[in-house]
């Protein structure tokens, strides 16, 4: 089973790379599959690649649902 998570872009880097944050955990990922991503945007992350941009309200609701199930840290935590 695979899981894709909403994460917030905190830094854009050269070469279609970015740093994302999920509850204080930061990871460098590829933005090669998604155009027009800016710092502060939420993206769906799967195996190191952003798959699509996500509405911030939808991302926060999803993260809160994961947190209530004990699966992830809520946005802004």
Image: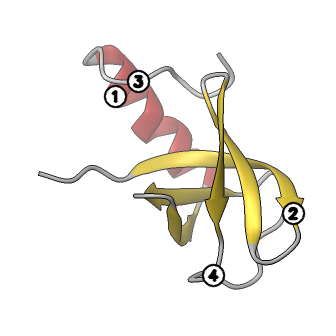
Front residue of 16/21: it is 16
Front residue of 45/62: it is 45
- Dot 2 or dot 3: first in sequence order is 2
Q: Which label lies toward us, 1 or 4?
A: 4
- Dot 2 or dot 4: first in sequence order is 2
Image quadrant where one finds the C terminus: top right
Q: Which mark is residue 13?
A: 2
Front residue of 13/45: it is 13
Q: Position of residue 34 (x, y in %)?
A: 61, 81
**With respect to residue 59, does 51 lie above or below?**
below
Q: Position of residue 35 (x, y in %)?
A: 70, 85
- Dot 3 or dot 1: first in sequence order is 1
Q: Secondary structure at mark 1?
A: helix
In terms of image quadrants, where is residue 41?
A: bottom right
- Dot 1 or dot 4: first in sequence order is 4
Indicate left or right for 68 with 74 as reference: left
Q: Residues within 10 Å of mark 1 (few under 14, many from 20)?
A: some
Indicate left or right for 71 with 43 as reference: left
**With respect to residue 37, does 76 lie above or below?**
above
As measured in the structure, the alpha-carbon distance from the residue carrying label 1 to the one carrying label 4 is 26 Å
């Amino acid at each position: 089973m695979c899981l894709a998570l909403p994460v917030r872009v905190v830094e854009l880097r050269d070469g279609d790379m970015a740093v994302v944050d999920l509850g204080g955990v930061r990871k460098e990922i590829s933005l090669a599959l998604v155009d027009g991503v800016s710092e502060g945007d939420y993206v769906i992350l799967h195996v190191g690649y952003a798959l699509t941009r996500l509405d911030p309200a939808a991302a926060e609701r999803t993260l809160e649902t994961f947190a209530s199930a004990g699966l992830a840290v809520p946005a802004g935590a």
